[in-house]
Amino acid sequence: MLATTVRAVATSPNGTVCTVNHYCPQGSKTPTPCPPGSFSSATGNIAVTNCDLCTPGFYCVAQGITGACAAGYYCPAGQSSATPANYTCPTGSYCPNGSATHIQCSPGTYQDESGQTACKACPIGKYCDPVEETARLGFASGVVTPAACPTGYFCLVNTTAKNTYPCPAGTFNNRTGLQSDTECTPCSGGFYCDNEGLSNPTGPCSAGYVCVSGSNTSMPTSGAGYTCPAGSLLPRPVVCRDPMPQRNLLKSEGLQNVSACTQCTPGYFCGSEGLTVPTGMCNAGYYCTSGAILADPVIPGIWHVCPTGHYCPTVQPTPEPCPAGSFRTSTGGRLSLTVPTALPALLCLRWSFQLYR
């Protein structure tokens, strides 16, 4: 209202009351219209201050309220045009027909053009968060420019915030602008991803476990990983392929480094890598301490040919001495498994003290 003071009712000389949307100062011959941008629904106005500002959302040219504010514009109180130049709908907002003020674009939408009647859908691979936009600009505003979806997340159409759609556990994403969960990267082999929304794997798989692609735990037992099998070891975050060295026998699962391998059993040999049981027995004529890799090798300190004065059957960790009354001058003495155990000196030469007559 232009004025709120109490006024006297104005009448014309012939007693006619001043009409609506007009005012009649003392001595008026005819009513004076309220100025553009104002109106009055009352009669008997005596001054221009008795006219009210045009209702918000409308404009007033003459004879009261003329019509609603045009779409793409907003009309605060007192407007005299349907398209007021100073009140074009700004970016980040929309203004339908009859708007008293511009309306901020809702979350998940944006507007990068002025004078618009509706906001646009936030595009795929981006998000539109008016709270974040307001914090960035320092004043209330809808989104003008959609932001790229951050690493660790993907964004569908109309995404309202950057953390709306995280990549699931077992995956990660170190790129921006992803559009679907199918673009999230399965966790790398040898690593695990135990949370949603990761930009990189959480860390390497625990020693003693195999993490194949997509593991969501450091100690997987099924699906995306498993316990490192017997005959293998896993000291590093890689798929369990490192076989144990020769001379060693790995008997259990989940071992973490080579020091956990067991030396090959005395009397036996381990001829390849990644074993859970020895390859076989050492050959007769040789004896094997622990760690043999061949059935009949001769390497000082580890694998030996049976020495003189001794014989060596199979599965022999140490040489057996020739029994009393016998001897052997050559190496490599052996005892066939088919020979009765009562004849241990078969390959040892018996010395006879009988005189031939």
Image (cartoon, rainbow, N blue to C red):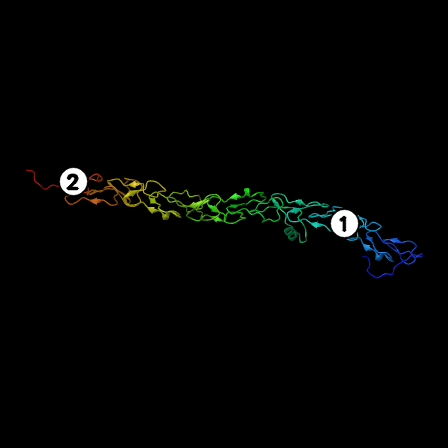
Which amino acid type is marked by label 1? Answer: Asn
Q: Residue at x 34, y 45 (%)?
A: 248
Question: Crowdedness of circle 1 by 10 Å Cα count: few (<14), some, many (20+)?
Answer: few
Identity of the amino acid at label 2?
Leu
Q: Quadrant of the N terminus?
A: bottom right
Q: CA distance from mark 2 to mark 1?
A: 124 Å
Label 2: which secondary element: strand
Quarter of the image with the C terminus is top left
Q: Residue furthest right?
A: 14
Q: Are marks 2 and 1 in contact (CB under 8 Å)?
A: no
Q: Residue furthest left?
A: 357
The quarter of the displayed image where residue 315 is located:
top left
Left or right of residue 146: residue 195: left
Residue 95 position, x and y percent, is 72, 48
Q: Identify the residue shown where x is 16% and y is 40%.
A: 349
Q: Look at 67% across and 44% down and name the residue there.
A: 120
**Residue at the bottom extreme, as displayed:** 6
Q: Residues within 10 Å of mark 2 (few under 14, many from 20)?
A: some
How far from the left and from the top, in percent, is residue 115?
73, 45
**Where is residue 54 shown, x and y percent of the image?**
80, 53
- Residue 349, which numbered label? 2
Q: Residue furthest top?
A: 357
Q: Is residue 237 left or right of residue 168?
A: left
169 vs 40, nearest the viewer: 40
Tell me residue 3's x, y (percent). 82, 59
Mark closest to the chain's N terminus, 2 or 1? 1
Q: Is residue 145 left or right of residue 75?
A: left
Q: Which residue is mark 1?
A: 86
Q: Give SS at disc 1.
A: helix
Which marked residue is nearer to the observer: mark 2 or mark 1? 1
